[in-house]
Image (tube, helix red, strand yellow):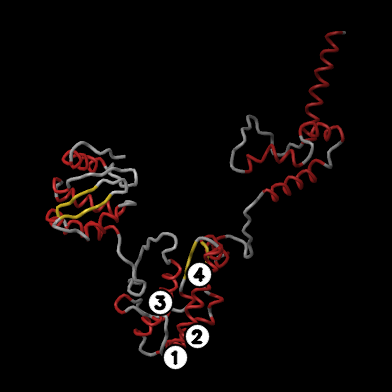
Amino acid sequence: MLQAPQTLGEEASKLSKDFDRGNMRFDSRDKIVAQIKLLTPQKLADFFHQAVVEPQGMAILSQISGSQNGKAEYVHPEGWKVWENVSALQQTMPLMSERMSDVAETLDPLRLPLQGERLIEASAGTGKTFTIAALYLRLLLGLGGSAAFPRPLTVEELLVVTFTEAATAELRGRIRSNIHELRIACLRETTDNPLYKRLLEEIDDKAQAAQWLLLAERQMDEAAVFTIHGFCQRMLNLNAFESGMLFEQQLIEDESLLRYQACADFWRRHCYPLPREIALVVFETWKGPQALLRDINRYLQGEAPVIKAPPPDDETLASRHAQIVARIDARKTAVARRGG
């Protein structure tokens, strides 16, 4: 956190050092008092660039735009004032414009180029669903002028991938609704919806567009709108031979029941048929399949067991028990002979 120094010059110097170290921050606890004209043009550009991306920074720009008497004023939440000489600010405008253009561009979904790769960054509540649905309409009709896709696409040629099942359902419903409403607007050649109105202005043959939208509306049940895991599962199912997967699969989030069923099956197949004396030995260690699962569960989750002397592949509990009993009997016989 910045501490207010004794003089404006000291604060300007401290700002310069903080920028060099990358420690500059704006928040409600900061006490920022600076004589900005003492900073170099490059440092001043850095100042306003950081103001854009910090929580309280936009207030600085809005206050500067309302400057009076050759000075720009920013009133800090704690009462401190930053006075900026506008002439010094004007020297940095080219640098500021360049830096701010590198931060972000305002997105127009009706003019976004639809060729190549495009990254759109958006936080919650900024209209992601609206934007994707608008882009979907453009791709169906080939709209956007020079930014349009080279040709109109069909529903089966479009893929939309999102994160949650709820978002998938909402997005599918919004796309279906947009297609239907724009088709009606094409038939009537008028609409009150601002989005559809802008799209209608670009459509030359509205009857043809209505036919394409009707076909898309009928195909929406087959539209590829998936979650990430849903899309991956679909690709595995469609390419079952190449991926070596089953034709029908079910995504299981909790494997605990399957693990218990496997332990119960093992217990039934290998422990129930054991002779009584061997079964009693096993029962001393594990009372049932639940106890067995508790001991081996960590190995089923990836931890490798440490086995110093692995048994032969053909060895069974009965054969191991017989070997142990034979060793005990041999030791008893040897002791008896020495005692006799």
Q: In this view, does 330 lie above or below 36?
A: above
Q: Quick one: label 1, few (<14), some, or many (20+) residues within 10 Å?
A: few
Q: Which quadrant of the figure contains the C terminus?
A: top right
Q: Distance between the residues labelled 3 and 4?
A: 16 Å
Task: Check residue 214 in the rendering and tell me which mark sits there, or answer none.
Answer: 2
Report the residue at 38% width, 81% height from top: 199
Kindly identify which numbered label has been placed on residue 188: 1
Question: Which of label 2 and label 1 is nearer to you?
Answer: 1
**Coordinates of residue 146 in the picture (x, y in percent):** 29, 77
Callout 1 amino acid: Arg
Instruction: Classify mark 1: helix, strand or loop.
Output: helix
Which residue bears the numbered disc 4?
171
Name the residue nearer the viewer: 286 or 328.
286
* 239 or 29: nearer the viewer: 29
Judging from the image, what secondary structure is the residue with disc 4 in?
A: helix
Tell me the distance, in whole angstroms, between the alpha carbons under discs 3 and 2. 15 Å
Q: Which amino acid does label 2 sit on?
A: Leu
Q: Within 10 Å of the Cα at label 4, are there few (<14), some (14-19), or many (20+) other Cα atoms? A: many
Tell me where residue 62 appears, x and y as whole percent.
Answer: 26, 59
Q: Which of 308 and 90 is in front in this view?
A: 90
Residue with the mark numbered 3: 139
The Cα–Cα distance between marks 2 and 1, rounded to whole angstroms, is 14 Å
Q: Nearer the viewer, mark 3 or mark 1?
A: 1
